[in-house]
Image (spheres, helix red, strand yellow):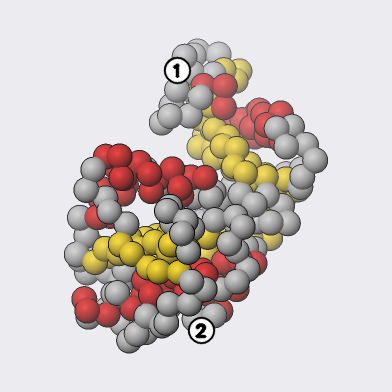
Amino acid sequence: MQVIHPSGPVNNIHPENVFDVVNDQGVMCGRGYVCYLYQPAIYPDRPVRIYFSMECTPEAEYMLFGALMGRALQLRQQHPHVAAYVYTDVNPRDTRLLNFCLHNGLTVGNAEELVMLQVPQDGGPETFGCTFAPIPLNTIQQQNALIANMAQNGLTHITQEYLQMLARNPVFVALGLFYSDVRTPVAECIISGAPGSEPELVAIYVAAGYRGNGMGKKLLRRALSLCAPYGVQNVQARIMAASQPQARLMRGFGGAPVSQMLLFPGKEL
């Protein structure tokens, strides 16, 4: 049994970050990958986040896990002077995988929590010398601008295909906060809801240099209020329990965890 790299990218992940385990007959027994993220806005205390995923047969687990950890240590050197964390995700009901992670030195110090936010009837005053405006998404260039802003602020899960899918939902809000004479938005958020389900706060960020003065709360209140004409009473949000900025923002709206969606076993590097 050996670990090899694929010949080309897998789902836009560079092949050096993808690992396949094959047995002596050349049959693939598993695949894993590593993603490097630098997210100071979401995790100011530990901004380097290295996510790994692995799917394999039980006999390939230790070999694949070792390869992924080795690559994580290499990637960690991109920002050697700031704190780093390597982690994966586990369904709370998957006790076998959770026990494997715990046996190999990971601890469950984080979880994705589902929070319910009540939709206010008004959007609050415009303060801080700022205004709110819908984000235009009529052209590819406009869509790419929003995606780039999100990615620059650590929200890398917004792709063009995903954004277009969100925009087709019955409930869709893409709102920006513009400060003083700054032409580009200093904060943006997306709320979207498919038929038969409660809308979800898909993404929100406040740009560096504008954080800590309540802009995120003002933006979220205005965006939530725009859902009221659709007959929406509650919006759900998925937050990382270990992210103090996310938890603080949700508490500002009286949001309390409803359930745990995923566990994130990990360890410091």
Residue pictured at 54% horizontal, 48% vertical: 154
Compare residues 20 and 234 and report the one nearer the observer. Answer: 234
Q: Amino acid at mark 1?
A: Gly
Query: Which percent across, then down, holds residue 107?
Result: 71, 55
Label 1: few (<14), some or many (≥20) within 10 Å?
few
Residue at horizontal 51%, vertical 24%?
14
Tell me what residue is drawn at x 26 percent, y 63 percent: 172
Name the secondary structure under disc 2: loop
The residue sitting at 65% across, 56% down in the picture is 43
Nearer to us in this view, 149 or 86: 149
Relative to 111, is 9 on the left or the right? left
The image position of residue 209, as x and y in percent, is: 61, 57
Can residue 30 be spotted in the picture? no
Check the image and name the residue furthest to the front.
Answer: 181
Up-down relation of residue 199 to residue 91 (above or below): below
Which quadrant is home to the C terminus? top right
Q: Kindly tell me whether residue 171 is visible in this rendering.
A: yes
Residue 98 position, x and y percent, is: 61, 53
Q: Amino acid at mark 2?
A: Gly
Q: Which residue is mark 1?
A: 8
**Separation of disc 2 and disc 1 at Cα?**
47 Å
Residue at disc 1, secondary structure: loop
Q: Which mark is residue 157?
A: none
Question: Which image quarter holds the N terminus?
Answer: top right
Question: Could you say which quadrant of the image residue 133 lies in?
Answer: bottom left
Which numbered marker is on residue 254?
Answer: 2
**Residue 240 image-quadrant placement:** bottom right
Image location of residue 51, percent across then percent down: 59, 43
Q: Is residue 184 above or below residue 6?
A: below
